[in-house]
Each structure stands twice: as C-alpha cells, then as structure tokens.
Amino acid sequence: MTHRSTTPNIDLSGSWQLASVDGEIRTAIMLPGDVHTALHRAGLIPDPYFGRNEEKVQWVAEREWAVERSFTLPEVEGDWYLDIDYLDTVASVHVNGFLALEADNSFRRFRPDVSSMLKSGDNSIRIVFASNIAVGAARQKQQPFYIPYSTGNSPIPDGNMLRKPQCHFGWDWNIAIAPLGLYGTIALKKLETARIEHVVTRQTHNNDGTVDLKVTATLFSKGPDIAQVYFELDGERVRLDVGVNGETHVNHLFHIDNPRLWWPSGSGEQALYRLSVELPTDEVTKQIGLRTVELITTPDASGSRFAFKVNGREIFCRGANWIPADALFSLSSPEKTEDLLQSAKAANMNMIRVWGGGFYEQDHFYDLCDRLGLMVWQDFMFACNLYPSTEDFLDNVTIEVDYQVRRLSSHPSIALWCGDNELVGALTWFEESRKDRDRYLVSYDRLNRTIEQAVKKALPGALWWPSSPASGYLDFGDAWHADGSGDMHYWSVWHENKSFDNYRSVRPRFCSEFGFQSYTSLPVIRTYAEEKDMNVASPVMELHQKNAGGNERIAATMFRYFRFPKDFPNFVYLSQIQQGLAIKTAVEYWRSLKPHCMGTIYWQLNDTWPVASWSSLDYGGRWKAMHYLVKRFFQPVAVAAIPSDDGETIRLSLVNDTLADVSVDLAVSILTVKGERRHLKDVKAVCSPDAAVTATSIDVSDIPEGTLLAWHFTASNGTGGEGHYVNGTYKALELEPSGLTVTHEYVEENGSVDINVSAKGLALFVMIETETDGKYSDNAFDLAAGESRRITFTPARPLDRGALPEFRFYDVYSCQSAD
C-alpha cells in the first residue's frame, strides 16, 4: 500500500538530535530509527550484539530520551496535523513547546491536530520517550491484581503492561534490551477539505464467476464540505462528489466480469489489481487480489478439521513462523525482509505465520507476501503472558485492532486473524493464575472478546481464530498435546527432550509451532565471538543461547544420534544437521497423514540477531543446513520414509499437493557404509491431486544391519528428489572415509562460482561453507561412492575475480573422525 499526499506537507524523517533527558548525552539520530543504534553509531555504546555487550547496554532502556529537530513553514494558514506511526512506545510529542500528543501504543497511528501550535518561519518538534521499563513497573502497581509475565522469556519485567513488541523485553531467542524509537512515518501535513483515513475492500464471488469488489473509503474533514473522490481499479475510473463532515464513509462497487484469481504459491497465479482512491490532495493505492478463503472446522471421527480452502480448493499449508527481521529497527530494511521472504518461497513455502510477540509488519512486508503467494496467518500482538483487562487497556487495544485490520485487510495474502499466541496455555504457567484460574480466565476472555469484536466490526466476515494453539472456539484446553481438533503447538521433542520418533506419536490437524534448535553458522558466530570464545560452554556462547538448557539439549541429542564431533566448527555443523532431521521427521510424517493434517508451520524462519535458535535462516539471511532440507521436504510432490509403529516395515509415502494426478518412478536401493548402492526395487506409483498414498513398503529385514535405505524419484510434473533413511542411529554406522574432492571455478558471465564435489566413499549431508555471504543451489546433500554434484554458489555481492572465496566442506564421517 502507498499513501501519497499532494497537499503542502513536510516529511520530518531524516536527521534529528538525540539527547538523554538528563542532558548528559547528546548525538545525532536518523528517524525512522532506534536509540540503541544511534548511540552505537556515535561510539557511545558498544555493539549490543557482540560478545557480552548486551549486559553493558542495559542502562539505555532505563533512561528517558528526547529527539528534536526544527523545520521551516512559510505560512501556517489552514488546518495542519502530524502523521505518526510505529512510535515506540510511551512518548509525548511537543510542537513549539506545546503538547501535541501523548502516546502509549506502538501499534497505532496518531494524527493530532497541531494547527494552533505552528508559526510562520522556524518551528521545533520534540519527542520525549519515557523509560518503558519504568512505565511498565508503574502500571503493574496500578492493576487491581497482579498480572504475571513469562520471566523465562522476559528478563526485563512488566513488558505485558505496554502495547509494544513483547520480544523487546527478551525472549528465548532474542536479546533483551527494550529498544525504543520511531520506526514509521513522521510528517506534518495540511488538511485540505478532507483526507483519507482508511480504504477497506470486501469481495463477493458470484455463482456466475464474476466478482463484486466493494471499496469503502473513510474520509475525515474538520467541517462540512464537498469532496471529489476518484475510485480506480485497473484502468476503470469513477468520480464521486460527496458531502463530508467529520468521519465519512464513501462506497463504490466494481463489477469484474472475468476475474484473474490470486492463488497461494504453487497453486496458481498471484494475480494482482491496482486499486486507488484519490482526492485532489490525497491518494491511497493498494494491490488487490481476488480470492476466497475459508477455514474448514467441520467435525469428523477424530475431532474436527482445521484446513484452509482458497478459491474452493483445500491447500496444505507449508511454512514457518516469522519474527521481527531484526531486534533493532535501524538494522532492518525492506531489502533484508524481501531476501528472507524470497528464501521462504524458494524453500517451497506457501504460508508465513506472523507471530504475536513482534510487530504488525509494515506495508511492504504484506505487499511482498501478496506478490510471492505467501499466505499470512496474522496473530494479534499478544504472546506468552497474561495481560490487563482494565477499561483503559481494552479501549487502547480496540483502537489498535481497528486500525491494523483496516490497514491490512485488503491484502490477499492475509488468510487468518488469530487472537494471540499461547495465552490460554499461559493461564497454567503462573502460580497466581493456577491458584485463581477463574479470575485470570475471565480477564483473558475479556481481552480476547475485545479483540474479536473489534476485528468483526472493522471487517465483517473476517476469518477469526481465538488463539494459537486452540482446539476450538471457547475451548480453553491443552492444545499442546491434544491433536484431534484445531491447531497444535507440539514442543515435546525440544522442551521435553523426547526423541525425534516422538513426532510420530501425534496426529495434528494443523501444527502451527514445533521446532528444534541449532547453532547459528560459523561465519555468523565469528561476527560476535572471538576465537577464545569458540566453545559451547564459553560465557559469550552461553549469552547467545537464550533458552535455558538449550546448549545441553543440543549436545545431549548428539549423544543420542551421532558420535560426538571432533571440534567446535563440526559441533556447529552437526547441530544444524540434527535440527534439519528433527523437523524433517515431523513434517514428513504429518504430510503423509493428509488430509487428516493440513498444515505444518515450523518454528522459526528467521533470527533477530546472531544467536543459537530454532531458525532455518541465519541472522543476515544465510541458509542453515535445515533450510536446504526444508526445500526438499516441502516440495509439492515428495517421497518420505515412514517406519511402522512395530518397527517391522518402512513405507515410502508419496505426497501430492498439486492440482493434477502425479505418477512417480521410484528407485529404491541399499546404501553401504562404503558408499555402494545395491538396487532393491523399482516402483511406479500414482497419487491423485491433493492426497498422500503409500508408494511401496520395505521389510526392515531386507535392510542389512549397518546399511541405509536410499531412494531417488522422478515425477511426471518434472520434479524429483532423493533421500535416505537410517533404521537406528547414525552413531551405530561404522562409516568409512568419504574421500571428498572439490574443484571450483569462477563463472564470468554471472559472477557465480561453480563447485564440483566428488566422493570416493559414502558422504552424508555434505555441507559447503564460506565466509563470503551468498547462497548455494543445493547443500547438505548425500553422495555415494563415485558420485559427484555440481553446485552453484551465488554471492550476495560481486566477487573480485582474483580473490575467490575459500570453501570448507563437512560431512558426517569427517565431522566425527579425527582423521
């Protein structure tokens, strides 16, 4: 969406002066931007992400800060207002010394009238940021009863008192520094006749295949007047002259005879229409996708379904959870966000869940999701805490929800509005709410109902889900372990330290969170740690692990499945391989249950800073080993090995998420530790659209001890793949040297590097790595004896022809061997 004003207006973004309110510190800050980054760029604090500097910058959030700048206004006649959004968080705005705004919600837009405060010539604007920490503590004391927050996630207390990203107070993957600043629009605008407040659309898809698009523009004027409003859709332009006074709603209906439909990635075209609503002095432009979305929750023998239906077709959702692109806003950018979302699409995803502890993302995020065909599961910004239900808090939330729903609802990518993340479960996490569940449950219900009512008022007919996870409407049960209905968060493998096989003990209808940690890649670790810190138990490494017991769990899992790696770089590598194996185990089994299960959204896609976490993309956007595995196991047509409950057979499951019948030629073999392939059988299998079938079954007795089951397939839709399955553990295999040899050459035409990898023996999960940022055409792949693979490395920035990167190579044998 773009909002362009042609009235006289002053863009106030750019360079401001930043000062601590006590006057001790003074420097420049760029707005939009955050205070921590400004202080770091001025050399006043160290890099918060490096070493143990997180501990050294805690004082920043405890202080009050002010930003100030001047601007020139030739003449002040008429009505003027400030346009501000993403103001984080408790702040007062002063124009020429007059109080223009008191704000306390970073998720709202503010447009205060400042006409009487302005003067011809030089003017000043000053924003004073209170300490969020101090305000949170004061508001907690004002509550009629104590409102608990998750101390495990939030070492900085009382963040639940504020309408601010909850992960700013820390999380089990985020730095805890409670940043503050202004991250969006800051402008002074003149109100001529009227301005556009919102543009909201509603679609009616008719039985004859046509679509009616109702466009509602909300205009604001100071008094009675006549406004000329232009509605335009794909070249069809209409003018309406309407009377306005205060807030006025203007409607226009476009009838589309031959609509091009918007589809999720992999299911069809992402057709988009340009819609504009224009006044002589104001214009809003949106991209519109024509589509229907339904959430199917009909009862069945297992409980009730949970499936998304787009344009009349059920879609299996393959995706990941999204957290903010950076812990500090100034270090993020639309380009970095696009890179992350492009990586999601490249890994065959069709859904992103915007998790409830971060931001309602900026417009460019949803525009990208529209273009890429990534459906958005949109949480409201409440996560893992309990929250106030006082009248003032709920009123604030109502305005927030109304604004965000009206801002975002026309995006075709948004598939679902979800009330919160894990607030029902949080009722059982705190001593206070366990002792007095009724009080806290009623309080939660007031908040949840406030959000729901505001959603449905702003967008009648919106797809609403009360919480994630939830077994159903007004069901306040345990959706972490109950798998018959609704969406599920399944965390027993990580948090309860259960085996990967445990993922096959549940049959979710839709799993919207599950995950397993790994270390961030070695080139990223080197950005925050010195050589002396390259040890999993070093204080620096422990500070960059925010989940209690996380490092021990990674190591303990290695003992379960692998022989222990020989050094720190191989420990990092193997942590990423086992992370990929964990998520692969879950996804492949749950996809094989289709249509019983209709979605797997793993935790998490990205990182906010360099840290050990559940992400498949490193901070900065590099692909971890897991993301290359994701690209394979999320293929629309995929083959996976699923062991039977009794361990006697292994079925090869064929999944087809496409619209057409698919036939697959499948070659199954035994792979020895020397790397020899012994042919077992050839299978031709067929799978109907949107289904999963068993292509063939293998008796475990046919797999000699100490060997692996392997396969490769080609499908009639032009795709293919390969895989292996170990009936037991990797540590039980007496692996022999893989004999990897590597050559590489620079490709002059496109600046990439061609890498040729060959093996003399069995090489499992061959991983190529370099300090140079970039992406590989494939990685974490297998080679049998005598096989080779050509990989293309595309650097993020052009290479110097005479200085090619140095590549490192890992595989399971060399990782565990001192050779």
Image (cartoon, helix red, strand yellow):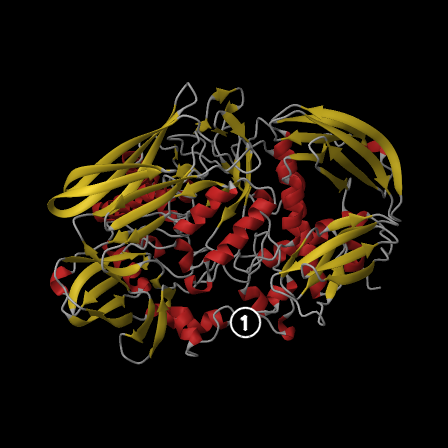
Q: Quadrant of the C terminus?
A: bottom right
Give the residue drawn at x 62%, y 33%.
591
From the viewer's side, name the closer residue of 448 and 269: 269
Counting labels gives: 1
Within 10 Å of disc 1 (Cα), the crowding (few <14, some 14-19, many 20+) is many
Q: Is residue 254 above or below residue 757?
A: above
Q: Is residue 778 visible?
A: yes
- Tell me the element at label 1: loop
Q: On the picture, is 552 further left or further right than 280?
A: right
Whole-percent x, y for residue 730 in the image = 77, 48
Which amino acid does the dot numbered 1 rest on? Answer: Gly
From the viewer's side, name the closer residue of 543 and 248: 248
Whole-percent x, y for residue 213 in the image = 34, 31
Q: Is residue 130 above or below residue 310?
A: below
Q: Is residue 172 visible?
A: no
From the viewer's side, name the closer residue of 62 and 740: 740
Q: On the picture, is 650 further left or further right than 678?
A: left
Residue to which mark 1 is pinned: 51
Whole-percent x, y for residue 40 in the image = 43, 74
Q: On the picture, is 492 further left or further right than 785?
A: left
Whole-percent x, y for residue 452 in the image = 32, 36
Q: Residue furthest bottom?
A: 24
Q: Which quarter of the picture shows residue 791?
A: bottom right
Q: Which quarter of the picture shows residue 582?
A: top right
Give the residue drawn at x 64%, y 30%.
656
